[in-house]
Image (cartoon, rainbow, N blue to C red):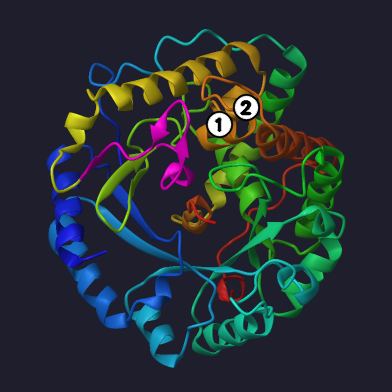
Amino acid sequence: MTSPSQDQVASVGHVAAPAERPDLASRIERARRQLAPAKEERAPGDGRWQNWYSR
Amino acid sequence: MAFAVLERALARITESGWLGDRLDIAWHAGEPLVLPRDYYAVALDLCDAALGGLTAVHHGFQTNAILLDHAWCRFVLERGISLGVSLDGPARFHDSRRVTRSGTGTHARVMQGVRLLQEHGVPFHVICVVGAEALACPDELIDFFLAHGIFRLGFNIEELDGVNRTSSTVDSEPAYRSFMARVIERVRQSGGTLRVRELESMRDALTDPGFDRYRDNDQNRPFAILSIDWQGGIATFSPELLGTAHARYGEFIFGNVATQALADITTDAHFRTVADAIAAGVRACAERCAYFPVCLGGAPANKLGELDDFAGTETMNCRLTQQALLDAVLDDLERYGAMPARVATAGAVRS
């Protein structure tokens, strides 16, 4: 489901920027660049099962 | 859940105006197959009637597979239900915690259900709860699943949340890191046949077009997840909160579909107290944690279970399922590069 608008539920907005940790941030950025082409090759709807919230 | 309660719940959902383009309905938190197929035939029809045309509806059962028979397999296939089987690997792990009321292990009966699913060609995945002992044995777990034609796995680390007040995996971060590193190696070695939810979820997070713009996740965004109990009680945030209570916050039922619209709940004082505390926790995570862009504020149920406070930040669940997992994925990528994309094949949907 979507959520109520922020004026209905003022909750998570206005967060500060994450603490700067260039090492992890740059590793993440490199990973994102590496993974981007592979993502496009995936079949539509392929990730459906993994989004399951279950025990 | 009586049909009248289900109909009220569906009406509350549609009138909220909060439906997205897809709604996943998970029948879980208790064995769903104890109810007869006829019940679900009607229930799914009610869902289709209420939601058809408004959103894409997908149903899922999380089951112990013990009650499966040929008719159930046909039903699951016909209705396109996603099926997850709770199976903790070999009998020595599974039977140590999953037992009948008489104390007998259920492994053999679960495997009987698995064989039935395979016989009927029903796609399914397995949710495997990993305790401290299994954490040291990733190869034994994966060898077991592969040997039984099970290729889609999710590993739930035994954790502190909701009703689970103890865990065998407290302080097991080094073991979890080793476990996931080995799991990643095995996924690579499988050439894409073996699929692990945690790795695919992390890959999805890293490649999401909205990466760096998201400010929260489904567990801490009000009503992104809606949990409704059999009596129509309404809960949201982490599903594990449903059915639990806390000295400071009370019960996590914020209303009932019989008497309250979802929008009414957003102004309820009890709900506001919980929502504000969860939001404070997310803000604190955003300010302090370098892993925030991936985890987006953690899981409220785990914060409450481990820290006794929604407004807290880092938990064991964070350290394992977010930090250690991301570190393992990054280590692997830096060492070997991106894995070839897995293309859906008949073989890969066998489990």
Residue at (24, 16) in percent of width and height = A7
Residue type, mark 1 in image: Leu
Please state the extent of the stretch shown in magenta in the rendering: B237-256
Q: Identify the element where label 1 is drawn.
A: helix
Write down the residue under mark 2: B307
Q: Name the image quarter holding the C terminus of chain B.
A: bottom right
Res A9 seen here? yes
The quarter of the picture where residue A39 lies is top right
Up/down of B130 relative to B103, above or below: above
Where does residue B133 sit, x and y in percent of width and height? 84, 58
Calculate the distance from the C-alpha at mark 2 to the C-alpha at mark 1. Answer: 5 Å
Residue at (61, 80) in percent of width and height = B110
Q: Identify the element where label 2 is drawn.
A: helix
Q: Are marks 2 and 1 in contact (CB under 8 Å)?
A: yes
Up/down of B97 relative to B23, above or below: below
Q: Residues within 10 Å of mark 2 (few under 14, many from 20)?
A: some
The quarter of the picture where residue B93 lies is bottom right
Are the residues under badges 2 and 1 in a single subunit?
yes
Viewer-proximal residue, A15 or B213?
Answer: A15
Write down the residue under mark 1: B304
